[in-house]
Amino acid sequence: MRIAVCVKQIPDPAAPYELDPETHFVVRPEDQVLDDTDRYGVEVALQLAEAAGDDASVTLVSMSPSGSLQGIRQALAMGADKAVIVDDASLRGADALTTSRVIAAAIGREGYDVVVAGTESTDGYTGVVPQQIAEVLGAPSLTFARKVEAVDGKIRIERQTQAGYDVVEAAPPVLLTVTSGAVEPRYPTFKGIMQAKQKPIDTLTCTDLGVTADNQQVITSVDPVPARQAGEIVEDEGEGHLRIVAMLEEAKVI
Amino acid sequence: MKTWVFAEARDGAAAANALEGLAKARELGGDIAVFYLGAGSNDAFAVLGDHGATSVYHLPAGESLPAPAAAAAMAELAGSEAPDLILFGMGNTERDVAGRLSVRLGRPVLANAVDITADEDGLVVTNEILGGTTRVASRSTGDGAAIVITRPKAFTAEPAGGGVPEVVAVASPDVGHAGEAGVLERHEEVAEGPDLEAADVVVSGGRGIGSGDEFEMIDRLAELLGAAVGATRAVVDAGWVPYSYQVGQTGKTVKPTIYLACAISGAMQHLVGMKDSSTIIAINKDPDAPIFGVADLGIVGDVHKVVPALIEALEARG
């Protein structure tokens, strides 16, 4: 079973990202981290590969300026076998559609049975790239999985719905998106971290993939939203709840 | 100007986000049609007419995940009808269809929209990033429809007194393997108490509550206040409450009179789902928690002391 995992390196969320005032693109530092939501996708991929046996492989696929690749190394240290990075100057500020075409081309070039992705990135939040990739690949998409298993050669998930959840399954080739409730991601071991340094990382350009960046989304302005006024902060000395009661009374909800 | 609004059927009627989209479509003016996916009825379609749709394209859903076929049918119709704008609400099926339609039409998706305006150059879509602290205005360039996913409650649904729309049955196109994700079982996880999205008071709990058992104090507090119970993504992912309780970027958006945040730190993805509440009260032991930046009243303290004391005080009032 050949498993491709879509991962993204993002600026460390602990330090909120900035937009370039001229281009309005996200300023991407040299050192980016693995988007935390992607750890769940990597874990699901590793578990599917472990269940499938020795022939299974897990390949990370990412569109990213190469930089230090420390985020990619994090995912390799968890246990993925190799990584494919698409790094091309023409992709700066690429919209979601362009991104999905690039990633789908990279996945198609590698060959795949299962594609795993998170549901949305923490920095961009468009939340449709996996579905776009599935459409480009002509694959079914099992989305918003809170549980994933391989059953009789098919992938079966519990899919979050507005009302509850559905049990859904499809045969490979298939794409799935996983929520962070699906699994508990493993921490890289020391051995894993050392091995990650030796694992292959292929870097590709748009030319290699035969795709061209066709950005159709432009940002016209960026403005701060007037901040909500912070209110009163009270240290609880055993009377804090009375302040809440007073405010509930003031709002006439009790 | 020609606008389409995507509507997923939930319990035999259009999802609320479609009616919100129709409100925005009316404001923009022009022709309005709804692409309706799932089980419908004359009553359900009449509601869409009342909200401004003059026609409804109806595609019933089968026993497979419907997004690939819906996107293919929409793309084919768009070829002849040439809509300028296609609106989607923020939901799982909505995102599945919007993403696939984007590829079919070769058009980008502008997501998380809180406003859409028209000027001489076309449509401008505004969204909020960085937990709602920054507004970004974007356009899609080139020819063809703008595909936009709107934030919940960005627009207020209102009947407009429109008549019964023309209903056009749409056949499900064959999309091959992409359409072969079979739905084997459907499960409902019913939330008790008031509807989270409509409630006047919401009591929400975060991971700091500690455990699923301890989360019961949030239920009790909500019961005393006649409030709906909400939760952060971390609590839903931990399995303490179902997804239907989730407030935030990928959950529900609430704007109650009172939002009481218990042991919620205030991650950006949570703030976007509740920051427009009239009054926000937060209890958190960390004085530096970002939630205090938006709270009207912040209690720095242990939720395991403050909440039981609050419950006791409310019980004493009878």
Image (cartoon, grey):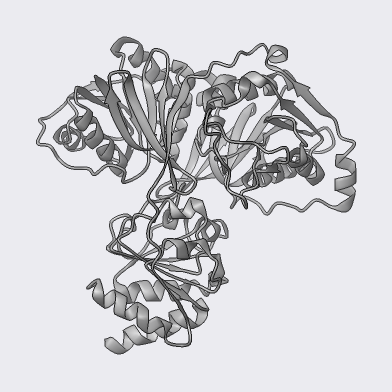
> x and y percent of residue B317 in the render?
27, 87
Classify B117 as above or below A52: above
Q: Most extreme residue toward the front, as rendered?
A: A22
A143 sits left or right of A227 in the view: right
Q: In the image, is A184 to the left or to the right of B244?
A: right
**Any part of residue B7 in sight:** no
Pick whichever, B176 or A105, lies toward us: A105
Vertical placement of A99 versus B161: above or below? above
Frontmost residue, B250 versus A252: A252
Quarter the C terminus of chain B occupies: bottom left
The image position of residue B167, as x and y in percent, is 20, 24
| Quadrant in which the N terminus of chain B is drawn | top left
Residue B107 image point, x, y percent: 45, 19
Q: Which residue is at 55% across, 28% downward?
A: A140
A209 horizontally vs B65: left or right: right
Can residue B25 be seen at all in this image of the molecule? yes
Q: Is residue B94 left or right of residue B278?
A: right
Percent x, y of residue A176 = 59, 36
